[in-house]
Image: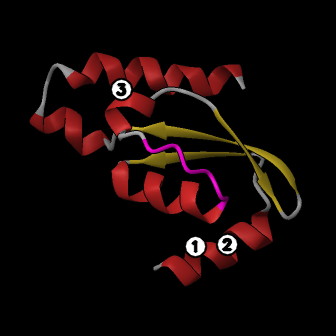
Amino acid sequence: YGPFLDQQLNIIKPQIIATLGRFSMSYVLAKFGVDSGQSISQLHGQVVAAEAPYGSIKIVPLYHPAAAIYNQHLKSTLLADFKILTTL
């Protein structure tokens, strides 16, 4: 689905991208040339600055919501991480 996502990003030109889960986090960070070398458990809820062809963007890695279903202790973490988006 990468080519479809790439097309959508080129059309929408978002200033903020919230990734849900480690696979989307890895794909989006690599797409924008960010080599964090960190796992989602280290990066979740943090704002990562990056450069897109159309300007500066912010990438916010988040746990996938399904993770909170399987790990109930992640629910409060996920909710707190989502609140970060309201500050951007």
Q: Position of residue 84 (x, y in %)?
A: 57, 21
Q: Secondary structure at mark 1?
A: helix
| Vertical comparison of 35 with 40: above or below | below
* Mark earlier in primary sequence (3, 1): 1
| Magenta span contains residue 4 | no
How far is disc 1 from disc 2 in space, using C-alphas? 5 Å
- Which residue has dot 1 on it? 5
Q: Which residues are magenta?
A: 32-37
Q: Position of residue 78 (x, y in %)?
A: 36, 26
How far is disc 3 from disc 1 in space, using C-alphas? 24 Å
Q: Position of residue 4 (x, y in %)?
A: 57, 81
* Mark earlier in primary sequence (3, 2): 2
- Which residue has dot 3 on it? 78
* Residue for point 67% across, 72% down: 8
Structural crowding at the residue carrying mark 1, measured as other residues with C-alpha within 10 Å and reported as few (<14), some (14–19) or many (≥20): few
Q: Position of residue 38 (x, y in %)?
A: 41, 39
Location of residue 3 (image quadrant): bottom right
How far is disc 3 from disc 2 in space, using C-alphas? 25 Å
Which three-letter amino acid code belongs to the residue tagged 3?
Leu
Circles 3 and 1: CB atoms closer than 8 Å: no
Q: Which residue occupies the foreground of this view, 39 or 58?
A: 39
Structural crowding at the residue carrying mark 3, measured as other residues with C-alpha within 10 Å and reported as few (<14), some (14–19) or many (≥20): some
Circles 1 and 2: CB atoms closer than 8 Å: yes
Q: Is residue 87 left or right of residue 53?
A: left
- Which residue has dot 2 on it? 8
Q: Is residue 86 left or right of residue 28?
A: right
Magenta-colored segment: predominant secondary structure = loop
* Residue for point 64% across, 75% down: 6
